[in-house]
Image (tube, rainbow, N blue to C red):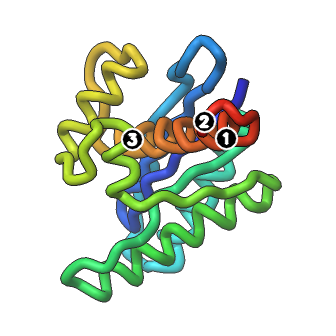
């Protein structure tokens, strides 16, 4: 059994999602969002860091998976996203957790089966895969999707090591 923390980093909202991956499948543990309430950017990074430290202390994950930064149209936004990602990575690294990174397309492929899936499709499949009833915030569903993606990749790596895939 492995407890996995997925993080969808953002400089205003950072989503987190925790699942347990066992022989019986995935089990939803928790999810939520760290909502940043300040404008001064260094204070935002500290809130992300402190929020992730609190999540790690509360739920005791064994591994962390996070989405890689992709360059879109706005370089400034990508830089801020990268810094938010760094704050989250540092927060889990202080707890000694290994960090795994996945591209957005990998996450969508693992969860939906299509690398170009929309966020709402990821949200829908996460709810089905984890048997979540009711509302699920989009940033939290993205984070849970990252957790599921990591679980898929870990399972495949284990099978390869055991010689079960040829």
Please tell me whether mark 1 sits on a helix, a strand or a loop: helix
Spatial CA distance of label 2 from label 3 is: 18 Å
Q: Do the residues labelled 1 and 2 touch (CB within 8 Å)?
A: yes
Q: Which of 80 and 37 is in front in this view?
A: 80
State left or right for residue 110 relative to residue 19.
left
State left or right for residue 42 relative to residue 154.
left
73 up-or-down from 155: above or below: below
**Location of mark 3 (residue):** 110
- Corner quadrant of residue 10: bottom left
Label 1 or label 3, whichever lies nearer to me, is 1
Q: Residue at x 35, y 57 (%)?
A: 104
State left or right for residue 41 relative to residue 77.
right
**Location of mark 2 (residue):** 165
Which tag, 1 or 3, sits closer to the chain's start? Answer: 3
**Location of mark 1 (residue):** 160
User: What is the x, y in percent for residue 113?
Assistant: 29, 38
User: What is the x, y in percent for residue 4?
Assistant: 62, 38
């Amino acid at each position: 059994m492995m407890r996995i923390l997925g993080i969808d980093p953002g400089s205003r909202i950072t989503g987190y999602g925790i699942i347990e991956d066992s022989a019986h499948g995935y089990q939803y543990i928790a999810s939520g969002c760290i909502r940043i309430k300040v404008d001064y950017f260094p204070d935002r990074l500290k809130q992300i860091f402190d929020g992730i430290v609190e999540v790690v202390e509360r739920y005791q994950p064994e591994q962390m998976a996070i989405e890689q930064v992709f360059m879109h149209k706005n370089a400034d936004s990508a830089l801020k996203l990268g810094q938010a990602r760094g704050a989250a990575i540092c927060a889990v690294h202080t707890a000694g957790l290994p960090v795994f990174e996945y591209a957005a397309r990998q996450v969508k492929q693992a969860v939906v089966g299509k690398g170009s899936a929309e966020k709402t499709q990821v949200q829908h499949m996460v709810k089905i895969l984890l048997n979540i009833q009711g509302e699920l915030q989009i940033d939290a569903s993205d984070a849970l999707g990252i957790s599921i993606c990591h679980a898929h990749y870990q399972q495949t790596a284990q099978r390869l090591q055991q010689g079960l895939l040829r």
